[in-house]
Amino acid sequence: MSSPMLKIDGLNVNYGAIHAVRDVSLEINRGEIVTLIGANGAGKSSVIRSIMGLVKSRANEMTYISPRTNKAVNIAGKPAEEHVKLGISLSPEGRRILPQLTVEENLQLGAYIRDDADGIASDMEYVYSLFPRLKERHKQKGSTLSGGEQQMLAVGRALMSRPDLLMLDEPSLGLAPILVDEVFAIIREINAQGRTILLVEQNAFAALKAAHRAYVLEVGAVSLSGTGAELLNNPKVRAAYLGG
Amino acid sequence: MNLNIFVQHFINALSLGSLYGLVAVGYTMVYGILRLINFAHGDIFMLGAYFVYFATIVYHLPWAIGVIIAIILTTICGLLVDRIAYKPLREAPRISALISAIGVSFFIENFAVVVFTGMPRPVVQPPILMKPIEFSGGIRLIPLGILVPVVSFVLVGALLWLLYRTKPGLAMRAISFDIEATRMMGVSVNRIIALAFGLGSALAAVAGIMWALRYPRVEPFMVMTPGIKAFIAAVFGGIGSVPGAMIGGLILGFVEIMSVAFFPTLSGYKDAFAFLLLIMILLFRPTGLLGEKLEDKI
């Protein structure tokens, strides 16, 4: 029933002498929300960044099966810009919005690989409907936005390439609790509209509640995996990440 | 000083300033994107002048065709400089690219001395550009004096249109803030960087050609003074800012021409004024006129 979309086997990332990711294997199926949780420095961002082609990594297998073509593509060693064209998109940690460009220009940049002006315009309206605050501020420079608005912009920008696989790196980082709930509600909404999501989070509780399946990373290796509900009730996870 | 003389000086200042500006734009674009001072940029200007000299005077091509060929060849040279000297060093510390830039600059200059010889060569100006036109009020101007600022403004206007109204322009502005984030959006960063080098080189070629027409000769070290002035213009206007580079060029042109016009006894100091301006702006507004404070990258 479930058709795989991304298969990673034996992923390793080294930064000089630091072995940041050790033999990580994971699988994402079409339509899922999969989350990677773990402590600060567990290697979550390194995993997601190597999937995106932003860091050098070694892996036995790194296959992406595009729902558009049903073809399996080896994405290992491909540069980030190729990933976007395949339908993978990343809202990076720290938001990385472009401070001197307006909200609208940031979104246009997200649609860089596309040429269908009408489709881009309607997707922009879609992003504005998800995040009405962005519409109010569409002519403002990115640097003038609050942290929460910048996060919305980063997610919206990642949606503008019409990705099949949307990767979100710490979308709740630094947000007020009320905004965290809002962001997770929107993540579920985006998923309900048919996009597969890989979510990296320190906020394990919210992430596990939202996710279909989850992997727990500890010092660069997968220590546990299961459905979101299983891990929410796992005593080890509760002790380590959910405050008992 | 009568009106005719003043208008002459004014047009002269506008010409010189817009040439500085045109070269400054190339410095500022590359700096804005790569944080690299492209020392070879001035030498690209010199190559543009030589190419047009060879096309029109040695190979007797019509000016219009010679100019186009010179611009194309110069642009290719600019792209090659990026490809050979800078692209392999994209991930290296910034100082490496800077040293590479100095090396390329020396290489091109000395290569030019070997190939073209160090002898200045006279450029034969097309008569149509030199025939004075009479305006009312006894003002006489040569067409070249009007052509230079007009061409410069049109080109910089076109560049601004490209930067602010097109997709490659959007990518170029984005890269200058965050290369990796731009790459994540599907932008082929090296292609956009090459575009910046290509455009900067084409503008430098046009400036070199017009410079060769104004001071009718070419020589391998012809860029020494205008190159430094253009660089000062880019810093003065706020390095990284295209309108700033043009404004900086114009201010420099006006200070240089007007100081000599109004205080002929100070004419020996005209280059010193440019440096004085540079020192003042660095003291009181280190980011330049239109420069924005560089934000720390996360």
Image: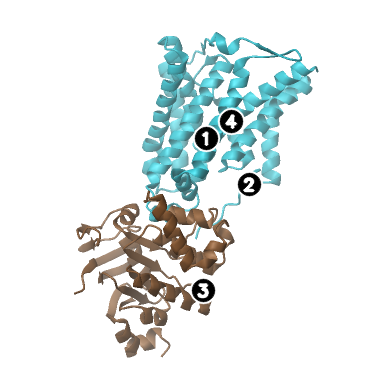
Chain colours: A brown, B cyan
Name the chain letter of the residue that bears numbered label 4: B
**Image quarter for residue A235?**
bottom left
B77 lies above or below A208: above
Name the chain letter of the residue that bears numbered label 2: B
* First-in-chain label (2 vs 4): 4
What distance separates the C-alpha of mark 4 from that of mark 3? 47 Å
Amino acid type, residue under disc 1 in the picture: Ala
* First-in-chain label (4 vs 1): 4
Other-residue count near label 3 (Cα within 10 Å), few / some / many at <14 / 14–19 / ≥20: some
Q: Residue at x 25, y 57 (%)?
A: A75
Q: Position of residue B12 (x, y in %)?
A: 67, 21
Amino acid type, residue under disc 2 in the picture: Thr
A31 lies above or below B296: below
According to the picture, the residue beneath numbered tag 3 turns out to be A175
What distance separates the C-alpha of mark 4 from that of mark 1? 8 Å
In the drawing, does residue B239 fall left or right of residue A220? right
Q: Nearer the viewer, mark 1 or mark 3?
A: 1
According to the picture, the residue beneath numbered tag 4 turns out to be B153
Q: Nearer the viewer, mark 2 or mark 1?
A: 1
Q: Nearer the viewer, mark 4 or mark 3?
A: 4
Name the chain letter of the residue that bears numbered label 1: B
Amino acid type, residue under disc 4 in the picture: Phe
Residue B158 circle label: 1
Other-residue count near label 1 (Cα within 10 Å), few / some / many at <14 / 14–19 / ≥20: few
Q: Position of residue B111 (x, y in %)?
A: 41, 23
Disc 2 and disc 3 in contact, CB within 8 angstroms: no
**Image quarter for residue B9?**
top right
According to the picture, the residue beneath numbered tag 2 turns out to be B287
